[in-house]
Image (spheres, rainbow, N blue to C red):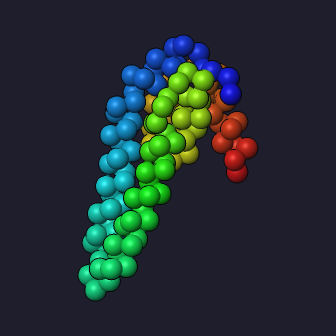
Amino acid sequence: MSSVPEKDWKLFRKLQNDLTAKACELIFVKVEELAKKREGIEHQSYLDLYDLIQTEDAKITEMFNNPTRNNVLLKLVSLKSYGVFTEDEFKMFSQETQDSVVSILELRC
C-alpha cells in the first residue's frame, strides 16, 4: 500500500483523538440501545452485548491501532466505511487521498 502525502498523515494524527472519541461514542449509543431492550431477556442481551463489543473492538483496531504513514490510507477507508468521518473532516484531506479512499470503498462493494 502506498503512503499518503505527509500533509494527510499529519492531519490524521491531529484528528486521531477526536475521531477515536467519536467512534467510541457511536459504540456507546449502540450499547445504550441494547440495554434499553434487555428487560426479560437479560442473558440474551448480555450475549448480544458481548458480540457487539467484540465486533466494535475489531473496528476500533482497524481504524486506529498502529497507524503508520504506509497504512493510514486503510485507516481512512475504515473511518469512512464505518461512518466515523463527517464529510467536512473527510474533505480536509487532499483530493488524491479522498479519491484513493473512494476507489478502495468502491472495490469493497
Where is residue 8 shown, x and y percent of the image?
Answer: 52, 19
What residue lies at 60% left-to-right and 20% top-to-bottom? 4
Can residue 80 be seen here? no
- Viewed as shown, does residue 101 lie left or right of 65? right
What residue lies at 39% left-to-right and 22% top-to-bottom? 14
Where is residue 63 shown, x and y percent of the image?
Answer: 49, 39
Seen in the picture, residue 75 relative to 11 is either above or below; the reply is below
What residue lies at 37% left-to-right and 67% top-to-bottom? 49
- Viewed as shown, does residue 76 lie left or right of 14? right
What residue lies at 31% left-to-right and 55% top-to-bottom? 28
Seen in the picture, residue 11 relative to 17 is either above or below; the reply is above
Quadrant in the rendering for residue 42: bottom left
Seen in the picture, residue 43 relative to 96 is either above or below; the reply is below
- Viewed as shown, does residue 109 lie left or right of 18? right
The residue most toward the front is 66
Seen in the picture, residue 89 relative to 69 is either above or below; the reply is below
Say which of 69 and 95 sits in front: 69
Quadrant in the rendering for residue 81: top right
Say which of 40 and 53 sits in front: 53
Can residue 3 be seen here? yes
How many callouts does the rendering have? 0
Where is residue 35 shown, x and y percent of the image?
Answer: 28, 70
The residue most toward the bottom is 40
Say which of 43 and 38 sits in front: 43
Position of the N terminus, as image quadrant, is: top right
The residue most toward the top is 6
